Image (cartoon, rainbow, N blue to C red):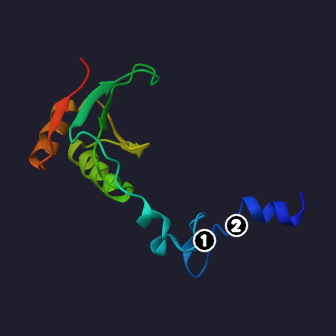
């Protein structure tokens, strides 16, 4: 692998001065211009909460879809939901996953924050 092909696909990942670096704009993450350009996803204004077990070896997971927030705000909302439910989870691909079967609690929390919420699935 020569030097030109190596620098085209990669770049600086961490700097002692700025910390973690954004691969897109090559700035520190706290000054990243890429995140500011990403608009919040548009939907129909309804947040859908469902329970899923497929692909999780029978373990129940509460999934929240359709929240029209930017990525950083979605992570913050996910953190609040996980804390309120007392469980773990993740935020990926625009969805919030909370470990366990907390559909009713999540619906109540989102409704209290002013979201229009529907239960999806069975």
For residue 87, what is the image quadrant? top left
Q: Which residue is mark 2?
A: 11
| Left or right: 53 as drawn, with respect to 2 | left
Q: Which residue is mark 1?
A: 26
For residue 70, what is the image quadrant? bottom left
Label 2, secondary structure: give it.
Answer: loop
The location of residue 67, given as percent across then percent down, is 28, 45
Q: 88 or 13, which is in the foreground?
A: 13
The location of residue 12, given as percent across then percent down, is 67, 70
Judge the density around disc 2: few (<14), some (14-19), many (≥20) Cα neighbours within 10 Å: few
Residue 95, relative to residue 53: is it above or below? below
Q: CA distance from mark 1 to mark 2?
A: 8 Å
The location of residue 88, given as percent across then percent down, is 35, 43
Q: Residue at x 47, y 23 (%)?
A: 55
The location of residue 7, given as percent across then percent down, is 77, 65
Q: Residue at x 34, y 25 (%)?
A: 60
Q: Residue at x 57, y 69 (%)?
A: 25
| Left or right: 83 as drawn, with respect to 5 | left
Label 1, secondary structure: give it.
Answer: loop
For residue 54, what is the image quadrant? top left
Residue 105, relative to residue 72: is it above or below? above
Q: Residue at x 83, y 60 (%)?
A: 5
Q: Locate the N terminus and report the quarter of the image it occupies.
A: bottom right
Residue 18, relative to residue 8: is it above or below? below
Check whether the beta carbons of the residues at disc 1 and disc 2 lie within 8 A of each other.
yes
Judge the density around disc 1: few (<14), some (14-19), many (≥20) Cα neighbours within 10 Å: some
| Left or right: 119 as drawn, with respect to 58 | left
Q: 12 or 8, which is in the foreground?
A: 8
Q: Residue furthest right?
A: 2
Q: Which mark is residue 48?
A: none
Q: Earlier in the sequence, mark 1 or mark 2?
A: 2
Q: Locate the C terminus and report the quarter of the image it occupies.
A: top left
């Amino acid at each position: 692998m020569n030097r030109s092909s190596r620098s085209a696909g990669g770049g600086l990942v961490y700097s002692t001065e700025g910390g973690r670096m954004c691969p897109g704009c090559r700035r520190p993450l706290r000054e990243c211009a890429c995140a500011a350009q990403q608009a919040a996803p548009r939907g129909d204004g309804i947040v859908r909460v469902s329970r899923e077990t497929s692909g999780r070896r029978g373990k129940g997971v509460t999934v929240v879809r359709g929240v029209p927030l930017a990525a950083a705000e979605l992570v913050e909302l996910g953190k609040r939901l996980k804390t309120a439910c007392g469980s773990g989870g993740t935020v990926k691909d625009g969805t919030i996953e909370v470990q366990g079967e907390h559909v009713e609690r999540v619906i109540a929390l989102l409704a209290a924050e002013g979201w229009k919420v529907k239960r999806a699935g069975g």
